[in-house]
Image (spheres, grey):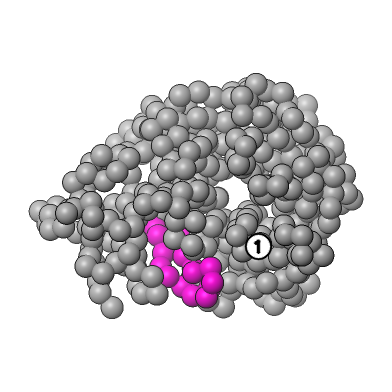
Amino acid sequence: MRIVKYWHLVVIQICSTIVYGYFDEDFNENVIENLPLFDGQYSHSFTAETEEFLFASRPNWPSQDALKKLGRITAAVPIDVEGSQVFVLHRADRAWDPNTFDENDVFRGQSEPPINVGVLAKLNDSELEASYLKDQFYLPHGLTRDHEGNVWITDVAMHQVYKYGPTLDGKPLLILGEKFKPGNDSEHFCKPTHVAVASSGDFFVSDGYCNSRIMKFNPDGKLITQWGKPTHEHGSPGPDELQVPHQLALVEEQDALCVADRENRRVVCYNAGLNFNSKDETGKFLFEIRSQMQRPGPVFGVAFCPHTQSLFALVGSWDASDSVDVQIYQFGSRSFVGSVADSEQGFGMAHSISTCRSTGPVGCLLVSSLNPVRQSENGQETRRIWFYQILSSFEKLVA
């Protein structure tokens, strides 16, 4: 095992070990001076001799001015293939606490107005460029941007799924579910968490905190099929037993839909049924990543990275003293590759992850956290979102 120290950096070797920490300020061997896209805005970067992928954290992203205008962040997704522009979904100052819902999962705050600021923010580079969707949401949760530029948002208070066109003019193209009415039939959700959209227009909804199911719809919003049921024996979930399916990752080239099965502490993947010959196998269990977990914990997020052909799993904790990291697994073998963490502050109340769609030399990883909005002792805003640039074949960059 090769031990490497660094500053704001993760070095990763497929089928090997990842180590994170710091290196001394005066150690500058193998520093990359001009990384693409962000041109030297990293404090330090280090490359070992044989590593294939490098994760470099951008320490001052987003800017403090942008953070001051964002509330509790539930999700973030790249807009372009390399992540120079990003959508961020937040709840302003609205919190979800034990009194938010009654015993029947009905939202108690229906008499309150919706969040009166734009819950969807657009970051360009590190600055806030625009905000959208004011006075429309109560407790936004999941965020997706599909291949056509449409934006999908789930709201757990309203038990609904919204689809907006690329212009984000405030008029939804599609609304599924009945406002403030939880349910478990084909026309209702109960605290839906996320949406994954195929290039065909078919889409999947993880539903969610109450129903423990995955629902597949056609482009018009008509239910095609559904699967999943509550977990009966804690610690030993069956293939189709789910306990808070929290985020989805669609891997179209493998015809797979992977689920962050939060309370079962696993990633579980199913046949997505996207091909003509596989439609009848939609929802069929493919595999799970559970026993391979390097540090068991609730799995809040899952994402597929085309750049590394890997599954990323956001493994959290209900204990504030425990670590939170993004664990990386090869999709084909499901073998553990390494992990990414913030060794300075930690990810805190990490909630979701996403990756860039790039298959080129530069990829990205975004980590979103529900950390409360406050200032630290030095007057800086609490960090609530992280951006990692993923590089490969970077020996060419330092030639």
Residue 392: image quadrant is bottom left
Question: What residue is drawn where x is 46% and y is 73%?
Answer: 336
Farthest residue toward the left?
26
Q: Quadrant of the C terminus?
A: bottom left
Give the SS element for disc 1.
strand
First to last magenta residue range: 325-345
| Between 127 and 40, the one nearer to me in the picture | 40
The residue pinned by badge 1 equals: 256
Residue 112: percent from the left, percent from the top?
A: 73, 26
Residue 231: percent from the left, percent from the top?
A: 76, 69
Residue 357, above or below 319: above
Residue 89: image quadrant is top right
Question: What residue is drawn where x is 72% and y is 57%?
Answer: 274
Is 289 magenta? The answer is: no
Q: Please state if 292 lies on the left or on the right of 250 as rendered.
A: left
Residue 232: percent from the left, percent from the top?
A: 78, 72
Question: What residue is drawn where x is 77% and y is 65%?
Answer: 277
What residue type is disc 1 on?
Answer: Ala
